Image: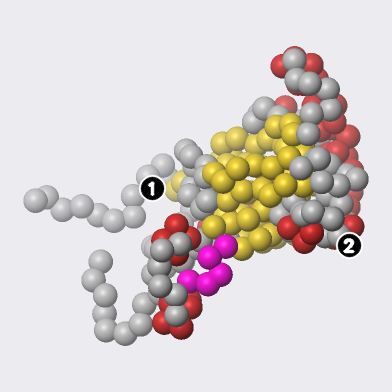
């Protein structure tokens, strides 16, 4: 790729934030369903009762068959299609792309009593997502004596984060700030992000468990070929 004269903003980090309109009805149902699944899977694994952190198997897409769940999954796919279309509008062909969105793994996590998830990325997919099912109300969650406003937030680290520790910072590279963004756990909120983006869940402590749905997804052309550029013989 050659660059024409002028200004270019390269390698942005796209993130999609969406709200599920039926969250008030869905979330209490998911809390009950996830509670039953947790009891069953914890017993099968031999987990300690009432552990501060629990992650289910990643087969919820097939395991849960409720109509409310199927509608929620359709919402996830629609949001993924919208977000990836916007993120790739300069890279995809001018006529657009006929997409096939595949959710490769979907699971839930429950945490409390200071449990957290270390910095990590997701493999074998191009996009990942986090949907918040339950957490303390914002005015309660943010008043925690130790964690404060960061109680249970998801922190995303920008691509330049690792380089900023030893970098000179002045007004010339102010565009790199902030090097991280913190997203609070808001029930009904879906956050979509590139799978390569480093992130972590900060410690959470509350009256209610912090319950989230996480998933990985890949996006392909419905035609079966993801090739964007032609190749010529050497």
Q: CA distance from mark 1 to mark 2?
A: 46 Å
Q: Main secondary structure of the magenta part?
A: loop
Measured as percent of width and height from the top left, residue 132 is found at 76, 49
Q: Is residue 86 visible?
A: no
- Residue 178 is one of the magenta-drawn residues: yes
Disc 1 packing (10 Å; few <14; some 14–19; many ≥20): few
- Residue 57 is one of the magenta-drawn residues: no
In the picture, the disc for residue 139 is 2
Vertical order, 220 against 191 (above or below)? above
Measured as percent of width and height from the top left, residue 45 is found at 72, 16
| Quarter of the rendering containing residue 166 | bottom left
Residue at the spot 38% in from the left edge and 48% down from the top edge:
226
SS category of the residue bearing label 1: loop
- The earlier-in-sequence mark between 1 and 2 is 2
Residue at the spot 56% in from the left edge and 36% down from the top edge:
104
In this rendered view, identify the residue nearer to me: 143 or 45.
143
Q: Is residue 191 left or right of residue 43?
A: left
Pointers 1 and 2 in contact (CB under 8 A)?
no
Q: Is residue 59 left or right of residue 92?
A: right
SS category of the residue bearing label 2: helix
Identify the residue under disc 1.
226
Q: Is residue 179 visible?
A: yes
| Quarter of the rendering containing residue 143 | bottom right
Residue at the spot 15% in from the left edge and 53% down from the top edge:
232
């Amino acid at each position: 790729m050659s660059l024409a004269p002028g200004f270019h903003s390269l390698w942005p980090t796209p993130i999609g934030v969406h709200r599920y309109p039926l969250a008030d009805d869905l979330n209490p149902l998911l809390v009950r369903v996830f509670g039953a699944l947790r009891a069953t899977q914890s017993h099968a694994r031999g987990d300690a009762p009432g552990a501060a952190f629990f992650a289910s198997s990643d087969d919820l897409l097939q395991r849960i068959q409720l109509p409310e769940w199927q509608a929620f999954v359709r919402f996830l796919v629609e949001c993924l299609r919208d977000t990836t279309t916007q993120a790739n509008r300069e890279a995809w062909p001018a006529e657009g792309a006929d997409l096939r969105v595949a959710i490769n793994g979907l699971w839930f996590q429950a945490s409390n009593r200071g449990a957290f998830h270390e910095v990590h990325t997701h493999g074998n997919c191009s996009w990942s997502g986090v949907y918040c099912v339950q957490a303390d109300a914002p005015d309660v969650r943010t008043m925690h004596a130790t964690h404060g406003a960061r109680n249970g937030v998801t922190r995303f680290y920008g691509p330049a984060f690792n380089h900023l520790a030893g970098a000179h910072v002045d007004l010339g590279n102010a565009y790199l700030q902030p090097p991280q963004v913190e997203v609070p756990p808001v029930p009904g909120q879906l956050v979509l992000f590139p799978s390569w983006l480093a992130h972590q869940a900060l410690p959470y402590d509350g009256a209610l468990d912090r319950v989230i749905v996480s998933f990985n997804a890949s996006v392909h052309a419905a035609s079966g070929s993801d090739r964007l550029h032609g190749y010529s013989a050497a």
